[in-house]
Image (tube, helix red, strand yellow):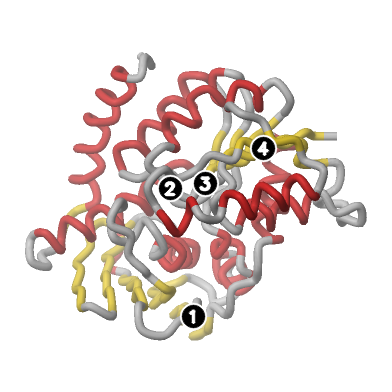
Amino acid sequence: MLRVGVIGLDTSHAPAFAKLLNDPDAPPELAHCKVVAAYPKGSPDIESSTKRVPEYTKIFQDLGIEIVDSIPALLEKVDCVLLETNDGRPHLEQVLPVLKAGKPCFIDKPIAGSLTDAVAIFEAAKKYKVPVFSASSLRFAEGAQKIRGGSLGDVYGCDAYSPASLEATHPDLFWYGIHGVETLFTVMGPGCESVTRAQTPGTELVTGVWTGGRIGTFRGLRQGSGYGGTAFGSKGIGQIGPYGGYKPLAVEFVKFFRTGTPPVDEQETLEIYAFMEAADESKRQGGVPVKLQTVLDKAKVEAGKRLKELGVE
């Protein structure tokens, strides 16, 4: 039995995952992996998150899951960790004790509140030799995975969309646009070189140019809703299809906990966050193209400083 700990009870993902894992009739791919303890504290200043903590804490208690008062107390009771705090800003400081304790960790979206902290998390994981990964549940939607696996042949382009509500404490696309951006990268794969962004009150439109001249776009919705997109491949054009729920992601992180092998490459995850950061930079510069490598190089320098400040060298 793998004992799972949860950090952060301020997102609907936390009770959804706990109910899947602690179901006495869980399927084999989720069996023998149970949430046994949780540390509830999440976002200190995002009202939409903090108000959820009492409700979700009670759900965990009703499931028989122990509530603890600190991350160190949690780590004494578990083999692996789901970092579920809805706010990406504290993730780096929350994950460091997890890494120091040698516990594999899935970090829910956004992996961090900045590209700098995202880089720092992976650097710390390498230093402590502990596997981590992060992903939106949209990555493992059936349609996206089939296209990634070659159902449309070589993918020449993709137009993906998702809701993209804004949160003042986070870069524009980190908070919710990440879902559609991760869908885009699941279909296109890594290799994006530059992005250009246009924004209106109701819409984001980010155009990425990949190696070989392939083009992918992300449309962020603040009027209407929905997840999906269109992929253009050598064998035809197809729809990515709808969101498939939380279970596919849960299957992947349970497999990760069992094997220690992340299902998403670190470099692809960092490229996703560089895409979103470069989109912000394009907006700041009036919509000009911004190279991902430029924002990544800057973040790597800043990440080293962040880790040094936190005593990780």
Q: Residue furthest left?
A: 286
Judge whether 26 appears above or below 72 on screen: below
Is the residue marked by circle 1 packed among few (<14), some (14-19), or many (20+) residues within 10 Å? few
Label 3 secondary element: strand
Query: Observer-nearest residue: 140 or 246?
Result: 246
Label of residue 38 in the image: 4
Q: Nearer the viewer, mark 3 or mark 2?
A: 2
- Tell me the distance, in whole angstroms, between the alpha carbons under discs 3 and 1: 22 Å
Q: Amino acid at mark 1?
A: Gly
Query: Is residue 283 visible in the rendered structure shown here?
Result: yes
Label of residue 90 in the image: none
Q: Which residue is mark 1?
A: 226
Q: Residue furthest right?
A: 25
The answer to whether residue 133 is left or right of residue 44 is right
Image quadrant where residue 113 sits: top left
- Tell me the distance, in whole angstroms, between the alpha carbons under discs 4 and 1: 31 Å
Q: Nearer the viewer, mark 1 or mark 2?
A: 2
Is label 3 in contact with label 1 (beta carbons under 8 Å)? no
- Tell me the distance, in whole angstroms, between the alpha carbons under discs 2 and 4: 17 Å
Quadrant the C terminus occupies: top left
Q: Which residue is mark 3?
A: 134
- Where is residue 261? Give x, y as percent: 64, 38
- Tell me the distance, in whole angstroms, between the alpha carbons under discs 3 and 2: 14 Å
Closer to the chain start, of discs 3 and 1, is 3
- Tell me the distance, in whole angstroms, between the alpha carbons under discs 4 and 3: 19 Å
Closer to the chain start, of discs 4 and 3, is 4
